[in-house]
Image: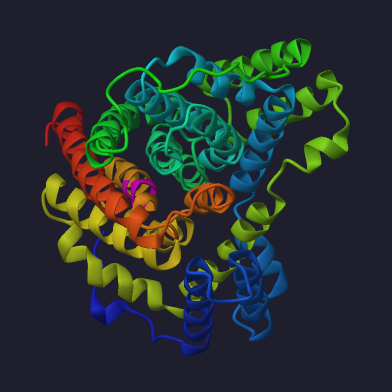
Amino acid sequence: MRVHLSTLPPIHWVPVVIFLITYLLIAVESNRGSYLDRTAAAFCGAVAMVLAGVLALDAAYQSVDWNTIIFLLGIMILVAHFRVSGFFDWVAIRISALARTPRQLLILLVFTSGILAAFFVNDTICLIFTPIVLSVTERLELPAAPYAIALATSANVGSVMSVTGNPQNALIGVSAHFSFLGFLAHLAPVALVGLALNAALLAFVFRRHLPRGAFPKHTAAIQASVDRPLLLKCAFSASLVVILWIFGFSFPLVAVSVGALILIIGRVESESIHRNIDWTLLLFFAALFVVIRGLEVSGAVAYMVRAFQPELHGSAIARLFGLSGAMVVLSNLVSNVPAVLIFQPIVRTLSQRHFAWLALASASTLAGNCTPFSSVANLIVLQQANKKVRISFWEFSRVGIIVTVVTTLAGIGILALEARLFQGI
């Protein structure tokens, strides 16, 4: 579908101004220069759209994609039970027990955190693993910075492969009606190659900080308390989610149904589960849906579609490069979830949009490694690591920029190859 200039409606500038101010506040908060966080900025923008008469209150309610909200809520409930069971602590401690050298520890951390992030959300893995990584490196007399950076970058890269890896993947998976296995089959190669590249790059960059021999000091193992009955119930529930998704049942319906099931059979105090759910993320999503709908009503989205169409109607590789490049830049300006929401209307106009959606998911996630402020996962790791070691903006970015560029190019190459194999283009 091509949009011609003569058919475009006039732009209403009030919603455009509200949109720009909202996204400026989101971007400023991303760089820690505002007392309003992302959620507050998005919420104020949504309210402004209604107060300015851009959207009626009923229209604002209807603009929220409740499928995405319910999907995220269900997954958060399940992940919260895994966290309470002690599963993540046990995994992190097992990594340190298996490794025999500093480089082995780095590689095990990269792949374990990356693969777990694909199924349990990257922010969750960073929140739980960081204190353990700091404790292990202190006991083994290793520098903490390489391992903290490895945790953040790997959680971002690994989360590419699954709809449950991060919020933008959930949004794309639900909106584009991907199957669980279909999404996984296409993007697992991107994530696994990206993790291998990340491990190699980190080992090279920090080669002077990682001794080649065995650990300089052996200490008593750190203990982890695991609630085995709860963990078995969590494993059963997670398996049920995957099986039902494989058989084609609705993403949000399955997620919220199994979330309700684990609340009943888990026998965990509800308050402890509530504390482990990111309610602000759900509000952030709901508010952004309203803000983006207001922008669409303004007529500006139609002009954006027309502006991007020449670059996105060429060859498959041209589309992948165009979308990926734009997403990397935009994700670092306004964060990845808002960037995906901005590009959704553009992707829907493309004739062959299957791989365009995948490029959006891949690039918006891999862009999160560029700077400390490019993803919440990075901020979680750096803020917690600051108790033991200071990692400067440049120390992270000099690694993050390289990782972002290399993994994004690898992702484009893999998706281009898949496009040729599966679509003959």
* Quadrant of the image containing the C terminus: top left
Q: Position of residue 102 (x, y in %)?
A: 37, 25
User: Looking at the image, how many numbered discs can be counted on the residues?
Assistant: 0
| Quarter of the figure with residue 314 | bottom left
Write the residue at 46% across / 54% down: 375
Write the residue at 16% across / 62% down: 311
Residue 124 seen in the current view: yes
Principal secondary structure, stretch drawn in magenta: helix
> In the picture provided, is 389 more to the left or to the right than 41?
left
Q: Judge by depth and name the residue closer to the eye, 421 or 382.
A: 382
Q: Judge by depth and name the residue closer to the eye, 114 or 98.
A: 98
Check if residue 65 falls in the magenta segment.
Answer: no
Q: Which residues are magenta?
A: 363-367
> In the picture provided, is 252 more to the left or to the right than 401?
right
> In the picture provided, is 259 more to the left or to the right than 300?
right
Q: Position of residue 341 (x, y in %)?
A: 45, 59
Residue 352 seen in the current view: no
Q: Position of residue 171 (x, y in %)?
A: 50, 47
